[in-house]
Image: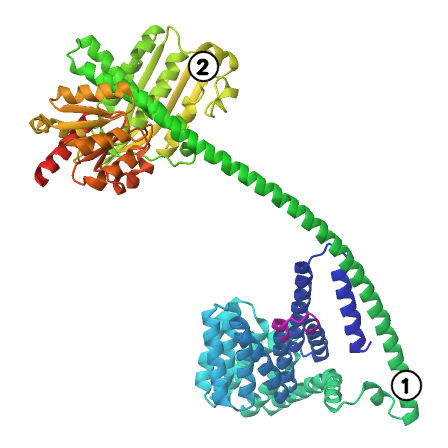
Amino acid sequence: MPIQIKKLILLLLLFCSTIVSPQTNEVTGDKMVKDSIENYLSKASEAINTTRLESALLNITLAKELAIYNENSTYRAKTNRVLAELYFELGDLKSAKQQINTAIKIQKEQEDEIALARSYNVQGSINTKLKDFDNAQKDLDTAHDLIKKNNLKDMEGPIKLNLGLLALEMNHPEVAIKHFNNGLPIIDTLKQSYYKAKLYESKAKAQMSLNLLDEALATNDLAMQIGKQMGYFEIQSESFDISSRLYERKEEYETSLQNLRAHQQFKDSLFNINKEIIAQDARAKLGIGEDKVIIEELTEENLQQLKSLKLGRLTTILSIALITILSLLTLSLYKNNNLRARANELLQNKNTELILAKENAERASEAKVQFLSTITHELRTPLYAVTGLTHLLLEESPTPNQKEHLNSLKFSGEYLLSLINNILDLNKLEANKVEIENTSFNLQKRINDVLIALGKSAKDRNNKLHYDFDKNIPPKLKGDPLKISQILINLIGNSIKFTQNGDIWIKVRLLKQEESVVFLNFEISDNGVGISDKKQQSIFENFTQGSVQINRKFGGTGLGLSIVKNLLSLLNSEIKLESEIGQGSKFYFDLQFDVFEDLSANYEEEAKKIDYNIMIDKTVLVVEDNKINQLITRKILEKNKMICDVADNGDIAVNKTKNSKFDLILMDIHMPGISGIQATKLIREFNTEIPIIALTAVTLTDNLDEFYNNGFNDIIPKPYKTEEFFTKLHKAFSQQKIST
């Protein structure tokens, strides 16, 4: 079958396969075309190596037709390169040069360094054959640099082979052998059999030039073996020729003649195999048709009739094919347009739904943020009263029994504040956005405070608390004591709630100590009601308890164990549980701490060093809208011999500051009328010297910059610790004295 008909049928089949199914997208079609081109080029290269040049030309032609039809310049360039290799094999170096120049021009425009490496390698071989050694050296050096830059392992061996061939053509056999020896391990590793055979054949020529006849024979035999095994006729032919010349030099003329005859037989065979392709190539150049050669004895009139007949048949075939293709294409476009229209409509509907959902989610998020901001302030403000009154009661010489209760109340207030923060920021907790403090603390004392706070609850349920603390644990550790308290209060409180007339064990053991790091194990166990295996899988989820009956009997929100799990996750640990119904439960976890003596500022220590005399007769304006908080702050200040005035809102505070002289202002933030921040900005317009301290229940982590930028000197969060309160007041008075 003529090549032109083969190409036409193949193109029709490939084109039809890409359009028969309307659902086949463009990406799939492109991939099929590219795969087909790569397959044809691979077959062409293999055919060139085995000297099946007609097959090589057919595959190259099919590849190029596809590349041109699909307007794919990348594969056109690849086809030009393989075609250059074919012309090189045929000995048509001029055509080979034209093809490789076209390939390199396209690849330079595309900046395709990988393809350029292969093309420069081919151009180097062509220039070597043309005896243009300078340009050959430049081409191969450029190819070598691109191969190294792009890590093209499969090209490292071939480039060494071509560098060796160039050196051999330039009569430098020693340099050629060096290149061959460098390339052989790479080619051998990648199992590139053709290049390996070519390398052995070329190395044998170099050894023959150096008169190393025995070595050349051994090397040439290796080339011959690969040629026979893989069917490389050209390699076998050339190897017989080399053997003939080698034996001639060794004066073994009979063996030389035998090899020469074998070489001639291969040469004749190669000519017979390739004469058709050579004839086709010549006819293409001369513009002579195949039919003219076949029917050269026909008259001119018969020849014209035959041409007209064949042209008519070809026209009919092409017309039918064109009509079929256009029909299929029209049908495909119609169906694709319908599918795209439906898809676009569906996509628009989904986009509208997503936009609405996004807007609703944003509104819900804004409402949630506003709610959390408001509720945080509203919950912290009464807590200020609790902690403030507790401090005042502790200062009024309570009995030892009362003092213990007040200390428990103070500790519980601090814990309640932290618990409120965690419940309000549960979403932050689950997203690991809660910050972890890193301060020094006494773990044994911290657990003692927890047990004292929970002692009454345990006594009410007739439970006994057993506390076992490892004496080898260092007294001072570095970590987050408040979160440790939260974890232990939740776990111990849980055991107390679900145990009646029983025992609860709290154990802290030292697992190991590595330099300044200790590894501790915490265990809280009881002999209470226990937890079923099924519920153990979900007990640590939000708002989950053992059962509805347990919720009704024992109460609670079901947040305790969820908070414990999330807090331990923040501390790089995890809670573990062992339990059996009616036998009790055991919760345990491991934590690590630095052994640390906190040398940084400590409000409790600093409070002991305060010179309270500096505060005597100082006038302080308390700006606070809550009457209980006004009373507590006023009593604390007056108890330390300071003069206190009160403003119920920001407007009154601004007017009083204009008309009276104060040594310090304690400014609340959320008040009726103007806020504390706005009041401070107004005061700073006429008084930049007076210290103003924010006394606030807002979340400081989000507002520090705003406070300082608007004129505040310092910040005291509510509910505050009295040590921090007096330390910051003393600091403000001291700085004012220095300024004066």
Task: Measuring from the top left, give residue 650's x and y in whole percent.
Answer: 28, 30
- The residue shown at (35%, 23%) is 379
Q: Secondary structure at mark 2?
A: loop
| Residue 69 is a magenta residue | yes
Q: Is residue 46 left or right of residue 19?
A: left
Task: Measuring from the top left, give residue 312's x and y in whole percent.
Answer: 89, 79
| Residue 634 is a magenta residue | no
Q: Quadrant of the N terminus?
A: bottom right
Q: CA distance from mark 1 to mark 2?
A: 102 Å
Q: Is the residue 545 above or below the residue 106 in the image?
A: above
Q: Is residue 642 left or right of residue 695?
A: left
Q: Amino acid at mark 2?
A: Gly
Q: Amino acid at mark 1?
A: Leu
Task: Measuring from the top left, give residue 378's x and y in whole percent.
Answer: 36, 24
| Number of numbered labels in the structure image | 2
Q: Nearer the viewer, residue 496 or 272?
A: 496
Magenta part of the chain: 68-76
Q: Secondary structure at mark 1?
A: helix
Q: Main secondary structure of the magenta part?
A: helix
Q: Is the residue 740 above or below the residue 614 in the image?
A: below
Asked if the residues shown at circle 1 and circle 2 are in contact, with their CB atoms under 8 angstroms apart, the answer is: no
Q: Quadrant of the C terminus?
A: top left
Question: Which label sits on residue 388?
Answer: none
- The residue carrying mark 2 is 530
Q: Nearer the viewer, residue 472 or 534?
A: 534
- The residue shown at (74%, 61%) is 18
Is residue 22 at all visible to an observer of this figure? no
Specify which label sits upstream in the sequence, 1 or 2: 1
- The residue carrying mark 1 is 306
Q: Is residue 174 left or right of residue 355?
A: left
Task: Measuring from the top left, give residue 500's x and y in whole percent.
Answer: 39, 7
- The residue shown at (16%, 16%) is 395
